[in-house]
Image: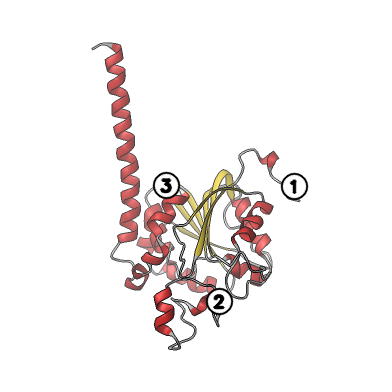
Amino acid sequence: MKPVLAGAILLLFASQTGAHAESAKQDALKAAIDNPARAAADRARDRYRHPLETLRFFGIKPTMTVVEIWPGGGWYTDILAPYLKPHGKLYEAVPPGPRSDSYRQKVASDPELYGNVVVTEMGPPNHWTIAPAHSADMVLTFRNVHNWMRGGFAAEAFKAMYEALRPGGILGVVEHRGDPAQAQDPKASTGYVRQDYVIALAEKAGFHLVSKSEINANPKDTKNYPKGVWTLPPTLRMGNTDREKYLAIGESDRMTLKFVKPIHLASAPDRE
């Protein structure tokens, strides 16, 4: 066989192999999302949270070390844990206190599902090590920035995420998006945060914005409700008052932001 032809065949084979490998990664993620073991109520919210598109946008891979911050009831954990279990690692950084105990019980309840999960803590007064320093390929947080603002430790939270990531690592943020025409309440009492405010918080910690996505946008969300963002589903804090109206709006309009920790750390701000 002529060398040129042989080289072309090898390139074609490598291309096909790479395509098959990438397809397998995507299939594994979809399988984790479509897993019938996920709670039916959780799966019903996929149409609002778009987990497949969101995680693909952030660039998740099954070999990564991933940290999820403040997982709540574990909606994303039930996707990330089986996806990362064969070849990756998952840290779940939970608030210290009773919520930490509750989440640890959840993880202990199913070693087969959560066998790759390491539970850490993040929050005041001194719980800021969410994973070994510079060890994570990706940090993810979903609808939590407003909680940190209310608690007065948003800057510390972003710094903790920065320290856990390796240079070149990715931070993925999803948050209720506030009205850019309204001044930002520093305590985010309505649950909404302006997108430029979140970007500024991340950049102050040393991150660079890579990309923005409208995957989780909801143009029906007017962002001006009696009980803030919790007026909308799934919380529906108004009870039966205008329930159908709020169900028709759906879950909140959300920003989806992808940041990177700079590889050349000298370009990052002074972190003292």
Looking at the image, tell me whether mark 1 or mark 3 is earlier in sequence order: 3
Where residue 86 sits: x, y (%)?
37, 50
Looking at the image, tell me whether mark 3 or mark 2 is earlier in sequence order: 3
Residue 34 appears left or right of 94: left
Where residue 166 sits: x, y (%)?
58, 45
| Element carrying mark 1 | loop
| Amino acid at pointer 3 | Lys
In the picture as drawn, the residue positioned furthest to the bottom comes out as: 240
Looking at the image, tell me whether mark 1 or mark 2 is earlier in sequence order: 2
In the picture as drawn, the residue positioned furthest to the front comes out as: 181
Q: Which mark is residue 224?
A: 2
Which quarter of the rendering shows the N terminus?
Answer: top left
What residue did someone put label 3 on?
61
Q: Residue at x 28, y 65 (%)?
A: 36
| Amino acid at pointer 1 | Asp
- Residue 271 vs 157, above or below: the answer is above
Q: Quadrant of residue 80?
A: bottom left
Mark 1 or mark 2: which is in front?
Answer: 2
| Amino acid at pointer 2 | Asn
Where residue 187 sits: x, y (%)?
66, 72
Where residue 145 sits: x, y (%)?
59, 65
Residue 254 or residue 182, whichever sits in front: 182
Mark 1 and mark 2 in contact? Answer it, CB < 8 Å. Answer: no
Instruction: Sort mark 3 into few (<14), some (14-19) or many (20+) by Cα contacts within 10 Å.
Output: many
Q: CA–CA distance between discs 1 and 3?
A: 31 Å
Mark 3 and mark 2 in contact? Answer it, CB < 8 Å. Answer: no
| Element carrying mark 2 | loop
What residue did someone put label 1 on?
270
Q: CA–CA distance between discs 1 and 2?
A: 38 Å
Residue 123 or residue 56, whichever sits in front: 56
Q: CA–CA distance between discs 3 and 2?
A: 38 Å
